[in-house]
Image (tube, rainbow, N blue to C red):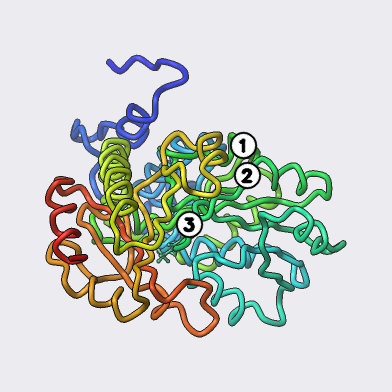
Amino acid sequence: MFVKITPMKIETIAIHASNKADEATGAVIQPIILSTTFERAADGGYPSGYIYSRSANPNRSMLENVLAKLENGADAASFSSGNAAGMSVFQSLKPGTHIILPDDMYHGLRNQIKILFAGILEFDFIDVNNSDVLQQHIKPNTGLIWIETPSNPLLKITDIKKIIAIARKHHIKVACDNTFATPVCQQPLALGADIVMHSATKYFGGHSDLMGGALITAIKDAWWAKIRQVQEMGGAIPSPMDCYYLARSIKTLPYRMAGHMKNAQLLAEYLEKHPKVEQVMYPGLPSHPQHAIAKQQMCGFGGMLSVCIKGGEVEAKRVINSLKLFTQATSLGGVESLIEHRASVEGPDTKTPFNLLRISVGLEHIDDLIEDMAQALD
Ligand code: PLP
């Protein structure tokens, strides 16, 4: 029998919080319940607790249980993508609410706000790390500060506790996109955030083969009830298959992250010394401008890094096209290394330098990754 040790370590939570032997068959791993509907009792009640799969499904409940426990939250809601998770937060706000977001946040969510929420919410994209600028932008109707740390793709670190202290003074909620860090490297709820958001498509899925999103809340309050309503009524939910695969992948998340981090640190150190490299952005490097903050609030620096190549866009693109092991593709968090010229996918209002390449460092042997990088740079 499994003995619960409190508090459990993340490796144990990742494996056991989504494990429950199937009562009907004794199967150790939860079966995939594809049924969209659940039988009612003679009195019309729902003895299983399930009614209809848009509202809840056993595989989704299991996934949400492990997500909540990984981030040490009171509850979790899962979605069909990271953008759907983000959108549910924005849809849960009263029309006319003012929100503050980082000016270097993930461009897909930035565009979602700008295009889908124009005329519904008020928003400002600012340097949230500058406390004076942040305080100047707070208005009586400011309801939410959105942060993303480390940021995509500049790997900027936001001091979570500093933002929370300012937000609390003004009774403003804080949501943190924790996709790059994962709960293995950073737990924003423990630092005071109200909600954590993830693109589960990335490290949670970990194999570049499914889309998913997650929100985890510190407390089950009226705001969370509204978010749950958006999830159920909006219906941007993951399928039972995707929930099963996500829960399965999460079991190895801490070990995969350990490998991603080790490789990323070594690759960052190699690149930083290379004469063809202008700058490496990785929070684990002492040269990173917010390395001290990263050390305080993270317990690992993640598997993402960005590198600026000397010689501008042309040279950066030449390097990408000379690589053999790194695949030129968007997205991140899979076991295979990916590399991308970000400015060309982010659109005209990008803040990303044109010589920047974003790297999702995979789990290949570091010697092979460095050898490939060396031949491409040279
Ligand atoms: N947040 C970050 C930091 C991301 O990198 C992404 C996707 O790249 C998202 C959110 C959106 O997630 P999804 O693509 O699963 O909708």
Q: Distance between the Cα atoms at labels 1 and 2?
A: 7 Å
Residue at 52% in and 69% down:
109
**Amino acid on which the number 3 mark rests in the picture:** Ser
Instruction: Classify 10 Å Cα crowding around label 1: few (below 14), some (14-19), many (20 and above).
Output: some
Say whether disc 1 or disc 3 marks the residue closer to the N-terminus: 3
**Amino acid on which the number 1 mark rests in the picture:** Leu
The residue tagged 2 is: 160
Q: Which mark is residue 191?
A: 1
**Amino acid on which the number 2 mark rests in the picture:** Ile
Asked whether residue 128 is in view, the answer is: yes
Instruction: Classify 10 Å Cα crowding around label 3: few (below 14), some (14-19), many (20 and above).
Output: some
Q: Secondary structure at mark 2?
A: helix
Which residue of the protein is positioned furthest toward the right in this rendering? 140
123 horizontally vs 232: left or right: right
Place residue 255 in its image quadrant.
top left
Q: Distance between the Cα atoms at labels 2 and 3?
A: 33 Å
Discs 1, 3 touching: Cβ within 8 Å: no
Residue at 45% in and 34% down:
299
Q: Nearer the viewer, mark 1 or mark 2?
A: 2
Q: Quadrant of the C terminus?
A: bottom left
